[in-house]
Every structure is written in structure tokens, then in C-alpha cells.
Image (cartoon, helix red, strand yellow):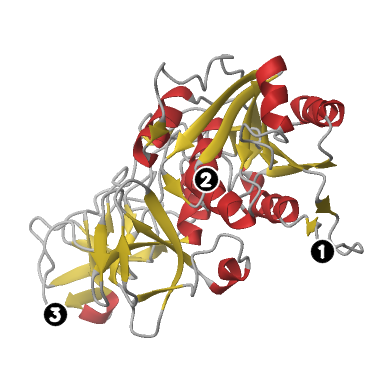
Amino acid sequence: MTGRLPNDCFALPPGVDWTPVDEALARLGERLAPVTGVERVDLASAAGRFLAEDVAARRANPAASNSAVDGYGFVREGASGTMRLLAGRAAAGEPFAGSVPPGAAVRILTGAALPEGVDTVAMQEDATVGEGTVTLVALPKAGANTRRAGEDMTPGQTILSAGHRLRPQDVALLAAAGHGEVAVRERLRVAVLSTGDEILRPGAPAEPHQVYDANRPMLLAQIAAWGFVPVDLGHAADDPDEVRARLDAGAREADVILTSGGASTGDEDHVSALLTREGSFAEWRIAVKPGRPLAMAMWRGVPVFGLPGNPVAAFVCTLVFAAPAFRRLAGGDWRLPAGWMVPAAFAKNKKRGRREYLRARIDADGAAEVFRSEGSGLVTGLTWSDGLVELPDDGVSIAPGTPVRFIPYTAFAP
């Protein structure tokens, strides 16, 4: 870990109460910066990593003008339908040794560098070979069936920018540009801590008043699926000393910490109380459903995102707020998920005041149906759904067929 954010990174202006979702996201985008170090990796392990610097091409692509087809190369100016066929050929990796004078042609294969004098290639399907000659059905236009040197990229041209997350096709681009390794950000390490006296390890014997810890395994799995390094801080009871020890471990081992539970300002919200006393704490009361209280803090120089304890709210807040923040902290550019408009397969009257996210999936007719209940305690809605329907801050009446914005879960990936 090398980068550090200022301790007042998450401070809110005086008098701020309820914060709209767009404003909360804009503030995060303005204040967050990469916190990960830089390393050089070979291309075989570069996919999924964020570029640490702009990358320029080291060579032209193609490096030499070449043939796009199997056929016959010649100089177009002054050419006739029948030309003298030279001995030999040009192949990829086996250039033609001589030059091709006007009135002559040479056999050339796909990818072969154009011999000196050649500027045009006729396809072999349009040619008939005789005794020492080649006759064309029709003369192609000058430059036909050739690839110009540097038409894809030229030396020194910026081909990828810092903050870009490398995909397999980007790895191909880097290889074609002459790079065998690249400078990337180290993988973001995300620590996860669940808190609360009522929380139990999944599978343990439970009393009716106790709750299984669904958040921690869910968040650890999501972090790994996003290509980051999950760090399991375990579960802490509602004890300040225990919470402090776990947060200290997270600050040592990770770049950012996610907590669930205890993030509001109630009597048993020990996470927020501890962060207030010994770190820096700001309760972002975001006008969102499900969710609302989202703790933003710094602990020993490491950013902390305090999620609601309810699994549905924790999941939605992770997607909407933590995912773009993680991308930025990991060295990526600030980016929000892309959705699209689809017809609704449900009816709802929404009041003005909060952005709402409904668990949804696309039915066989291409419309968005929503889970049977908006209750954020129903975890089955997360597995039933494939994404979220986002309803605007303003009031809205939705009937079947009304356009609504659908965001698949995959679109939230950093």
C-alpha cells in the first residue's frame, strides 16, 4: 500500500442532511484517488489490471505494408491485363528477395510484406497463370488488397490510457505494439468485517433472536468476483476493543475496509462510535432505498465504508457506491454503471424524495419484472433477480409498459 487519502476525505459540508444519490456519487468521484502501488507484470498476467500510466506503441502495426489476400502483387501504374510472372514468391515471414519492375507480377500470400515496387495485389481468384505470365480478369484499383504500414498504429502513438482496466483484447493490442510487460496498479485489497452480538457463523446452532452472517461471505465473494483481493477480518461482537483490533488488522493488511452493521448512530452502533472517537467519521444520510445511512470514515489512513447490516441494503449499497469507489481506489477512472430502458412488467406509485432500487429481472418479453416484495430483509430476492430497476428521485407512477431503467448486476463491476 502506497497511496493515502486525506483524513477529512469524507467530511460533509456544514448543514448537509439528506444527500441525493447523484450528489453522493459526485462527491466520491471528486475526493477519491488511487491508493495502490505500481508494479510491472508480463502480458500473460496483465488482464484485469488497471494501467498505471499511458502506454504508447513501440512499433508500427503493421510494421511493413503487406498483402491482405493470397494473389499476385504488381505496380498498378501502367499495368496491363497480362503481366510477366516472376519466379519466387512473397510469404509471411519469407520476404521476396528482389524487386518487382513495371509490367511484372509476383506470387504473394496473405500477410507477406509487399516487395519493392508492389503497391497493388490482385486476388488469386481473379487471375489465370500461364507459361511465365499471369492474366487478370480485371485490373483492381491502385492499393487494392493491401494493408499500409502503420495504418493501425504508429510508433509513439498513445494506445491505452492510465486508469484503463485491461481486457484480453487490450493484451493483444499491447503485444502487437511491441510490449512484453506493462506497468499496472497492484490489486486492491478489500477487507471485510461484520459486527453485532446477534451475528452467528453460518451453519452454527442458532436461537431465534440470532442471525447468520450472510453479509461477510457475500461481500468477500463479490470482491473476488470483481478481481480484487478479499481480506477476511471475521466477525466482531459489539465490543469497542474487539472492533478496534479488527479495524487495525484491516488497516495493516488492506487498502480499504468494508464493515456491515453498527454504522449508524444508535446505542449499539459501536463501529460509528469508535470511528468518531479514534478516526474520522461522517454519516452520509443518502436519499436511497434500500440503504440510507452509509458510514464514510478514515481509520489509520485507510478508507472505511460502513454498510447497513441488512444483506439486501448492504448488497445494493456495495453495488451503487462501493463498486465505483473501489475502481477509483484501485487506479481506475471514475465510472458509473450503464443501464438501459425497458418496459415495466409491474405497477407502482413512488413518492418523491429518494432514489429507489428494486430487485428485478427481464422476462421472456423483454420487460422488467420486480421481486414480489420490497422488503430488504428478503434475501431470496437477490438470487431471484439479475439486476436492479432504478427509479428516479422524483415521484413517478409506473404501469405495465412504462419505460424504466434496468441495470444488470454485471454492469456494476468495477
Residue at the disc numbered 2: 175
Query: Callout 1: 10 Å neighbours few (<14), some, many (20+)?
Result: few
The residue identified by callout 1 is 208
* Residue neighbourhood size for the residue with mark 2, other residues' Cα within 10 Å, grouped as few (<14), some (14–19), many (≥20): some
What amino acid is at disc 1? Pro
Kindly give the residue lying farthest to the right in the view shown: 205
- Which residue is nearer to you in this view: 91 or 104? 91
Q: Earlier in the sequence, mark 2 or mark 1?
A: 2
The residue positioned 24% from the left and 76% from the top of the image is: 401
The residue mark sitting in front, 3 or 2, is: 2
User: Is label 1 in a helix, a strand or a loop?
Assistant: loop
Q: CA distance from mark 2 to mark 1?
A: 58 Å
Farthest bottom residue in view: 364
Q: Residue at coordinates 13% horizontally, 67% vertically from top-left? A: 140
Q: Is 186 or 258 nearer to us in this picture? A: 258
Residue 1 visible at all: no
Secondary structure under tag 3 reads loop
Q: Residue 314 at x, y = what percent?
A: 60, 50
Give the residue displayed 38% in from the left and 66% down from the top.
Answer: 109
Specify which label sits upstream in the sequence, 3 or 2.
3
Position above or below: 245 against 81: above
- Mark 1 vs mark 3: which is more N-terminal? 3
In screen coordinates, is 117 left or right of 211? left
Note whether 334 is above or below 83 in the view shown. above
Side of 40 relative to 148 (left or right): right
Q: Nearer the viewer, mark 1 or mark 3?
A: 1
- Tell me the quarter of the picture where residue 245 sits: top right
Asked if the residue at tag 2 contacts the one at tag 3, i.e. Cβ–Cβ closer than 8 Å, the answer is no
Give the total of numbered labels.
3
